[in-house]
Image (cartoon, helix red, strand yellow):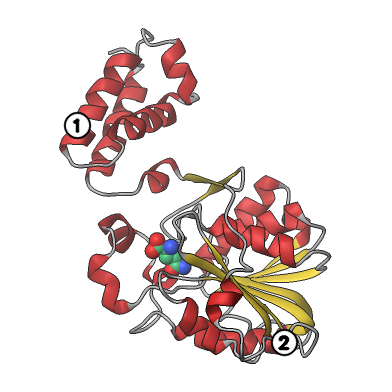
């Protein structure tokens, strides 16, 4: 069996099973089995698969056909240009979440201390530690997730500047100690469970996804806790689920300088605001519409 034939057969199997992007997925699984880059498949189409490669490839095709997400098979996902290890203990980092990082980089310039709440794989905390000079605390309620995140920090050279804490939200963080609080919290409404992609619903950790009947439960607890740990003038930045911008903006009505950044799909994806009594207090005459026009637009 050659690489070319293996891709063709794998793509056909995946396609018949209704897997999206069947050919790309087959190529990526084959690369994982052969330990090569994708371009290698095109440079050496006549190369014969070794038996062990064929066995691995076959097993992984089967797993993907059963619905297991590609990233849990290859155990990796790229985020902000770096490869993060993932396991079913953590949410697979999403491209939209890069907008959260960009928001913090743009609005949190000079922040020396940041905390990432619900860090999962550590993608946000580690990226911020590597892209800035900040010291970052990363918390998660899941011990298993923190273990994944610690491994990523070590592999990516961020370990000295990220401190990992197992605990609920900001319980372990001292009052008025932080310049920025960042979070991609669980925000999916229980009511939307049935409409989620089965890959997400059946494979990703429920604790990282769901937040009560309308998806707002974690924001409700996080906002006052963030106020407690931030220094005056500190930044709070949170990822939003579809259609949640107004409800979350209401939760931060006491905060200053509220902005909602839209993702590439035009969805209000990141809300950020300042623990500020000055100078940017949002006036009540300014509606959310106008505030949104100050939002940043994703560029990648
Ligand atoms: N963005 C995830 C999804 O695709 C949800 C992540 C979250 O709840 N923070 O459903």
Image side of residue 46 versus residue 299, left or right: left
- Tell me residue 93's x, y (percent): 50, 55
- Tell me residue 121's x, y (percent): 54, 58
* Residue 169 visible in image: yes
Image side of residue 197 versus residue 135, left or right: left
Q: Give SS at disc 1.
A: helix
Number of callouts: 2
Q: Give SS at disc 2.
A: loop
- Label of residue 281 in the image: 2
Query: Toward the viewer: 113 or 159?
Result: 113
- Residue at the spot x=26%, y=21% of the render? 8
Say which quarter of the image contains residue 128: bottom right
Image side of residue 223 versus residue 48, left or right: right
Q: Which mark's residue is nearer the viewer, 2 or 1? A: 2
Say which quarter of the image contains residue 49: top left
Image height of 11 relative to 67, above or below: above
Quadrant for the N terminus, please.
Answer: top left
Pointer 2 or 1: first along the chain:
1
Say which quarter of the image contains residue 227: bottom right
- Label of residue 13 in the image: 1
Query: Toward the viewer: 57 or 232?
Result: 232
- Residue at the spot x=40%, y=32% of the render? 28
């Amino acid at each position: 069996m050659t690489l070319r034939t293996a891709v063709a057969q794998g793509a056909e199997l995946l396609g018949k099973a209704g897997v999206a992007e069947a050919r790309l997925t087959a190529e990526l699984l084959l690369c994982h089995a052969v330990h090569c880059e994708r371009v290698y498949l095109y440079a050496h189409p006549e190369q014969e698969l070794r038996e062990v490669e064929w066995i691995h490839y076959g097993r992984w095709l089967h797993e993907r056909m059963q619905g297991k997400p590609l990233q849990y098979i290859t155990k990796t996902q790229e985020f902000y240009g770096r490869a993060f290890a993932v396991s079913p203990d953590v949410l697979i980092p999403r491209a939209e979440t890069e907008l959260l990082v960009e928001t913090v980089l743009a609005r949190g310039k000079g922040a020396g201390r940041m905390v990432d709440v619900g860090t999962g794989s550590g993608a946000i905390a580690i990226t911020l530690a590597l892209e800035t000079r900040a010291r970052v605390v990363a918390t998660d309620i899941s011990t298993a997730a923190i273990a994944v995140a610690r491994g990523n920090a070590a592999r990516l050279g961020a370990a000295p500047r990220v401190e990992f804490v197992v605990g609920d939200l900001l319980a372990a963080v001292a009052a008025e100690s932080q310049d920025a609080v960042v979070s991609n919290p669980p925000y999916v409404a229980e009511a939307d469970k049935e409409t989620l992609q089965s890959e997400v619903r059946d494979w990703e950790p429920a604790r990282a996804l769901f937040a009560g009947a309308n998806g707002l439960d974690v924001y409700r607890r996080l906002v006052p806790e963030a106020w407690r740990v931030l220094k005056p003038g500190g930044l709070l930045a949170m990822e939003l689920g579809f259609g949640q911008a107004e409800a979350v903006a209401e939760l931060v009505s006491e905060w200053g300088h509220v902005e909602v950044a839209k993702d590439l799909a035009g969805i209000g994806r990141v809300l950020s605001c300042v623990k500020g009594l000055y100078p940017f207090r949002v006036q009540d005459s300014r509606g959310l519409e106008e505030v949104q026009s100050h939002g940043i637009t994703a560029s990648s």
